Image: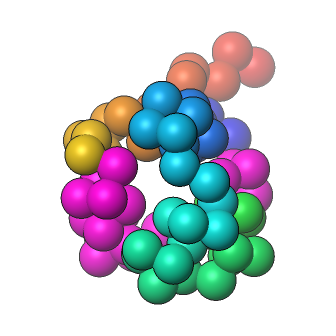
Amino acid sequence: MPIKVNLDVMMARRKVSLNKLSEKVEITPANLSILKTGKAKAIRFSTLETLCRELDCQPGDILGYERDMN
């Protein structure tokens, strides 16, 4: 998939754990883990907004596009 999720990078930069972030954004740790590992098929804008607010970043810091070379 050409959409790359960099949530783990942002979490490491902000030194925040999965459990702590899941509490702050009110998402279960399991669902946040699915998003963090890039296995999610979609994300709500409200969830993305909350993640950006808590991590003090922009949506482009969490999501990126990599051209599929196939």
- 2 part of magenta stretch: no
Residue 41: which quarter of the image? bottom right
Give the answer, above or below, for where 12 lies relative to 7: above
Q: Residue at x 25, y 46 (%)?
A: 56
Please state which of residues 53 and 49 is positioned toward the viewer in this rendering.
53
**On the picture, is 40 further left or further right than 23?**
right
Q: Does residue 40 appear in this view? A: no
Give the answer, above or below, for where 5 lies relative to 51: above
Q: How many badges with numbers are in the image?
A: 0
**On the picture, is 54 further left or further right than 17?**
left
Q: Does residue 37 appear in this view? A: yes
Q: Residue 18: horizontal and vertical position, in percent?
A: 64, 60
Q: Residue at x 34, y 49 (%)?
A: 55
**On the picture, is 64 further left or further right than 33?**
left
Image quadrant in which the N terminus is located:
top right
Please state which of residues 38 and 52 is positioned toward the viewer in this rendering.
52
Give the answer, above or below, for where 40 lies relative to 23: above
Q: What is the chief secondary structure element of the magenta stretch?
A: helix
Q: Residue 16: horizontal and vertical position, in percent?
A: 53, 49
Q: Residue at x 74, y 50 (%)?
A: 37
Give the answer, above or below, for where 5 lies relative to 36: above
Image quadrant in which the C terminus is located:
top right
Residue 24: which quarter of the image? bottom left
Q: How was this image coloured?
A: rainbow
Q: Residue at x 24, y 58 (%)?
A: 53
Q: Residue 7: horizontal and vertical position, in percent?
A: 54, 44
Q: Residue 21: horizontal and vertical position, in percent?
A: 51, 64
Q: Tell me where the magenta segment starts and ends, as one range.
A: 36-55
